[in-house]
Amino acid sequence: MIKTLLKSLREYKRPAIVTMLVMVGEVVMEVLIPYVMADLIDKGFHNGDMPFILKMGLILALFSVVSLAFGVLGAVIGTRASAGFAKNLRDDMFRNVQRFSFANIDKFSTASIITRVTTDVANVQNIFTMSIRIAVRAPMMMLFSILMMFFINWKLALIVLGVVPLLLFGLTLIARKVFPIFTRMFKKIDKLNNTVQENLHGVRVVKSFVRGEYESERFGETAEDISNDAVMAEKILAWNGPIMTGGMYLVILALSFIGAYFIIGNEPVTVSFMGTTFTTGLLNSVFTYSMQILMNCMMLSMIFVMMIMTRESMRRIAELLREEPTIHNPENPVTEVPDGSVEFDDVDFSYAGSMDKLCLMDVSLKIPSGSTVGIIGGTGVGKTTLIQLIPRLYDATGGVVKVGGRDVREYDMVALRDAVSVVLQKNTLFSGSIKENLRWGNPDATDEEMIHACKAAAADGFIMEFPDGYDTHIEQGGTNVSGGQRQRLCIARALLKKPKVLILDDSTSAVDTATDALIRKGFREEFPETTKIIIAQRISSVQDADMILVLESGRVNDVGTHEELLARNEIYREVYESQNRQQVSGTSSREQEG
């Protein structure tokens, strides 16, 4: 897991190493200061040697300035390294998500991906900052302080070290109790973010159904659940401070007793303790070293707690970085799609990848290049699933899907998807001008090409009614244009790719029948060589197609022209008659009102 994350360090590896080396320099200076102070007390103050006091004072000042310089340098370089590491992590995660197939996206919810890229990376950045600074400084300070204490009196050093195992035992108990709580809490945070995302995305639906209070209560329950977990975790983590402080005070009491009994209680400045000549200055240095050991032990315990809290964030980030796309290019991909012919050869498909849970079964179909194909069927019969196999948004579980006479798995995915434009049911417009949105289809498109595509999609008319025309600003998601206008802009954007295959997944559902007819006329006249595959609920949208496919329960029920299906297919006839009755009924009602 750590190796996976550290791959994102890259150009910030050197600043991170420099930071750790600078921290070692700071530690060396701070460890030397108590030893020099001991000489200043024993040889300077007690002997009244002013030249020696000045000399040691200058040395102490030099060590302090150098230590301060190392500390500032470490903070500056360390911050640059940690911020850069976080930037690389986010960039690597986002790039990997861009490589995901729809199956990978289905595995990770959108809210979870957002949490991983934001909150989880922030947690990892904090622990990384602590790791290259405090996690280096604290153990080095402890090590050097222990060595100096052993140099002064090894038996006295054992008094300080004796409390360390007790502290480690307490930390281990805390970790075992608190880690499962944080794991559970992060999953609930994902759920909370998902609730926020759903409500912001569907705020119009929430308000129109007056569900604001219900959604607020639902949000509040999840937030309360997270709060309870956080409180429970903090109650356990709160033991860390008392345990560390208690150990530190025990050592301080022991050393204070030694100082009081053997130094203060005896008039001579120098006494013998445990076989070592002991002085007031040395006792002062031992006291300082013991404080350094215990204070830095406390700092390590804080890092330990942070590691417990961050471990789940690290796992979640590593999981996203290690996720391999389920769809990838072959070794020697074909980079040119010759034409827009499409063929399904005994195709089966399952979202679960299991032949026991098939959404499509035994689909066989040949679509000549340049033809227009309509797809009709009830909700959930597999219409969208079928067309998503053509540009390899998913791979068929069984059988072969061909475009231009070749298996889609033989193509370079960029080349295939450039040749197959898909206007999905939930196509999105992005914040920016209409021109910027249209150029998603072709970054190099000229104004003339954009106008041509918009005219074919029956979009040029309403665009020119805007005061700024093609420079009109579109809000995120296209919220400042109507549903029908949004659909026509998405169709124009797809046409700008000049695709060999154009797929419309119920993409004219929000336009009236007259506009729908204009769009189909534009397709026939302006893009005769492009294969058009149209999924629609209205028979009128597909009745002039070269062939119409009727899907039922994931299988092809029938294929034929409008007249052929009307004569022989019961499902198609029922839909046609039902829609005609509704139209006749609607016309009669309007005439009566008139």
Image (cartoon, helix red, strand yellow):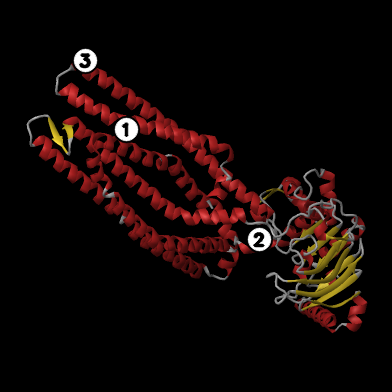
Residue at the image position 78 percent from the left and 68 percent from the top: 386
Q: Which residue is mark 1?
A: 31
In terms of image quadrants, where is residue 286? top left
Q: Which residue is mark 2?
A: 104
How many numbered discs, if any? 3
Please name the residue shown 91% across and 82% down the image.
Answer: 567
Identified by mark 3, the residue type is: Pro
Q: Name the outermost residue toward the front.
A: 275
> Callout 3: helix, strand or loop?
helix
Q: Separation of disc 3 and disc 1 at Cα? A: 24 Å
Query: What's the residue type where badge 1 is placed?
Result: Val
The answer to whether residue 536 is visible is: yes
Judging from the image, what secondary structure is the residue with disc 1 in?
Answer: helix
Q: Is residue 543 visible?
A: no
Query: Where is residue 288, by image quadrant?
Result: top left
Q: Which residue is mark 3?
A: 51
